[in-house]
Image (cartoon, grey):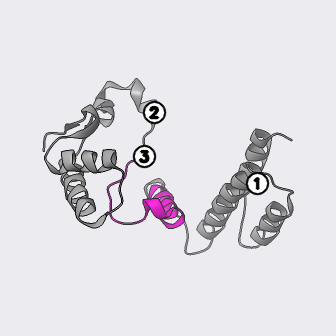
Amino acid sequence: MTEQELRTEWQKEAREQTLDTLPAFLAKLAAYPHNYGTIVVALGAGAVATARALDRTPNGGITGFQAGGVMWEFIQGWDANMAGDNPQRLVNYGDLLYPQYATKFTSISPETWDWAQQEAKRHLQEEEFAHPKVREHWESIAGGNIPFGLSVEAG
């Protein structure tokens, strides 16, 4: 079975899980003879299965809006690079098809710009061994130069 076929199968099963069926599903995922790619697919399916099972409990029943919060909780809990209070954005490139989303691809919020400048200044003070090009980039940001051709959204 290909990785894509496994993803399709496991994600379908994941969406059906309850607290009663979850242990067997996780055991099935764990028993699979994984390679570099399939373990990632299995971990993703296991995370979805666990969330679905918890949501089916009497205290569950989250909304679609709350589901977006679950995604961020997982991302920030799983990836140490995403933890913390730094501004983050998930880009849906499907939004390229709608003109009202143009600023998502050309600008950052004033709050993000303020954050970036403060972080650049902090890194300049705290990071002794940064590459010279990285330090130059931080100095530019700290000096008020908006990077990468972006603009700051009107506040």
The amino acid pointed to by label 2 is Tyr
- The residue under label 2 is 93
Which mark is nearer the camera, 1 or 3?
3
Decide which of 149, 31 is in the foreground and name it: 149
Decide which of 150, 124 is in the foreground and name it: 124
Around disc 2, counting alpha carbons within 10 Å, would you say few (fewer than 14), some (14 to 19), or many (20 or more)? few
The amino acid pointed to by label 1 is Glu
Quick check: can you spot residue 62? no
- The residue under label 3 is 90
- The residue under label 1 is 13
Residue 74 x/y as whole percent: 52, 62
First reached walking from the N terminus: tag 2 or tag 1: 1
Around disc 1, counting alpha carbons within 10 Å, would you say few (fewer than 14), some (14 to 19), or many (20 or more)? some
Task: Tell me which residue sits at (48%, 64%) in the image.
Answer: 80
Please state if 132 lies on the left or on the right of 74 as rendered.
Answer: left
Residue 102 x/y as whole percent: 30, 29
Quadrant containing the C terminus is: top left
